[in-house]
Structures are given as C-alpha cells and as structure tokens.
Image (spheres, rainbow, N blue to C red):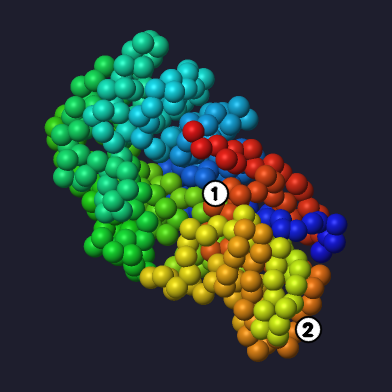
Amino acid sequence: MNDRLDTPSVIIDTDIMERNIRSMADSAKRLGIALRPHAKTHKMPWVAQKQLDAGAVGITVAKVSEAEVMAEHGIKNIFVAYPLVTPAKIARAVRLSGQIELIVGVDSLYGAKLLSQAALEAGRELQVRLEIDTGLRRTGVPYDQAEALASAIHAMEGLRLTGIYTFRGALLGGKPTLDLQAAGAEEGRLMAELADRIRAQGVPIADVSVGSTPTGLQAAVAKGVTETRPGTYVFQDRMQARLGVCSLGDCAGSVRVTVVSRPSADLAVIDGGSKTFATDVQPNTDPMQLQGFGHVVELEDAVLERMSEEHGMLRLGPAAQASGLKAGDVLHIIPNHICSTVNLHDKVYFKSGDNYEERAVLARGKLQ
C-alpha cells in the first residue's frame, strides 16, 4: 500500500473496473441492444471513453453541465436523461446540440413547448425522448397519459421525438423488491407495450430505453426494448452486492480511511464522515436491510454505524475488538452507494498493482 496516499481517499481498482466494463458491454451485445451508460457514477470523461471503446453507443448524464464537461473532453453522443424546463439550461442544451449528437429528456407539454421554441429560434431541430413513469413516482409522464403527450410532442416544430425512456430501479408492483428478474421483466414489458401503442398513433418511436444496473439487462430481454442505461456497474457498490447484481469482489471502489481514535473497546473513529461517504442509501431499510453505511473490508464484524460531518463511528464486534486495531491504522470501506460518494470527492485514485494514478472528477458538483 502507498503510505503517502492520504485519507480519506476514494480508491478505484482499475482491473476490476475494466472487467465490469467488458462484462456489461458483452451482455448488451449478446442481447442485441444498445448500451448507453450513465456517467453519474464516475463523472469522468476518461472512464466514459473506456465505456465507449468497449462498445457503448454513447453516454447518459443528468445535467447539461455534465454534458458540457463530457463534450469538452471528446464525448460526442450524449443523452441528458432529465426534463429540461428552465430557459438557461435549454439555451445551453440547444447550443450543445450544434456541437455533438445530443438527446434531451422531456416529460411535460410545458417543457416540450419551451424546447420547441428555443430550437426554432436557433434554427435547429432538437432530438428528444419522452420520460415515462413506470412506478417510481419521480419524473416522467404518468404511464396512462404518455400516448397523448407523445402525439402532441411529435406535432411540434423544432423537435424530433425519437424515443421513450424510464428509470424504475428495483421495483415490482410499485414496491421495492429483491426479485430483479421479475422487476426487470415488468419494466421491459411496460415500455415495449407502450412504444407499440404510441407507434400505432403514427409516432415513429425508434428508441425504447430502460435503465439501472439492477434491472437494465433483465428489462432489455423484453422484445421491443432497444437500449439500457446502467451506471453503477462500472464500479459497483455494497447496495448492488446486496441486491445480488455482483459480489463484493466485483466492487472496484472503496474509501481508504484512517483510524483517528479508539475511545473504547467497541468503538473506533475514522476520518471519514458524511462529507466522505454518501448517506442516501440508509441502513436498516427494506428491502436490503444493510447494516451501516459501508462494508469494512478488513474487519468482518465492524459496522460503520454513525457519522457526523468529519467523523465515522465504527461499532466493533468481538473479532474486530481482538484484532489489535489502533489509531493510525488504515482501513478500506466499500460504500453503500458509490455514485454519490464519488461526487463528494475532487479526485480519486486509480490503483493498478502497486501504482496509483490521480484523476480529477471533472464533472463533480455539476448540478445545473
């Protein structure tokens, strides 16, 4: 281990990452669908290029600012899978569409009218996809209203409606589930059937895009699905391991931390808290029932139980208490959610053998 590498730091095992990239690309190819990875996980054009080199048709982002960073560094086919409804974002998207192949999301008549107006004023045609709510109750037009909205958007000047997309995650019958096969099958069926109904109205839907690492491949089995947009797979994390998507050995990312205090036999304090680890995947919640905010690689019965901004409190079981753990010791923790964790760090370290390469997270904090 490189003792000069300070903590807390995000470490990415390059060999595992590249294995994950190849595996997903091979799976998409085997299914005969397009792979458009979501770059929210890594936020680095360098990693996006590796995904493209392995066979991805383009990338997905959530923000126009992320798309701008990716385009600036050579990524030329980008889908902003998020409804754009503010004039500033729309103006930037229209400008970017003149430089790269850009697709943007829409889920309302209001947003579509703004996109149409901006495209016409710029003398451009903007490629759009209609987002569908298939049960997550986040963004997306309600499923039973999608056909009418698709027809309305198709009739608008300045817009070319090329597809529909959804993000559903591990849901089945509207509830969280660990049955990824059934959840994915339901997602794919809903989207393929909807695309057929929209086409029957004369709207030439070409792309039927499904998403998420847990269910993307299962959903893509459905006849009529054309694309999948997984993100987390590139690094994997504890959440995906608990869902059964991968093993902990497939997790390329971990956070290197130092024990800064041993106040009692059953407590160790590390130098990573809520400004280091994502807290959006909470412990002790269904369906995963994760214990703590991450998996402590070196200590089987240690639990990252509590965090303040700069402190992480490890509850130590009998084995950890007997390990001789002391202040100054270094640990590695696989976070529950790697995507949000990476976004907390300005840089990460890619490990290959005993060598570490520092890389800036160029799209970090790009929220607009």
Residue at x-position 42% and y-position 53%: 212
- In the rendered view, does 212 fall on the left or right side of 158? right
Q: Residues within 10 Å of mark 1 (few under 14, many from 20)?
A: many
Q: Which residue is mark 1?
A: 41
Please give left or right for residue 52 compared with residue 13 in the image.
left
Q: Residue at x 29, y 36 (%)?
A: 107
Front residue of 17 and 270: 270
For mark 2, give the secondary structure. loop
**Mark 1 vs mark 2: which is more N-terminal?**
1
Image point 24% across, 62% down: which residue? 173
* Three-letter code, disc 2: Gly
Q: CA distance from mark 1 to mark 2?
A: 35 Å
> For the N terminus, which image quadrant?
bottom right
- Disc 1 marks a residue whose amino acid type is Thr
Answer yes or no: is residue 61 visible.
yes
In the picture, residue 198 is in which quadrant? Answer: top left
On residue 324, which mark appears? Answer: 2
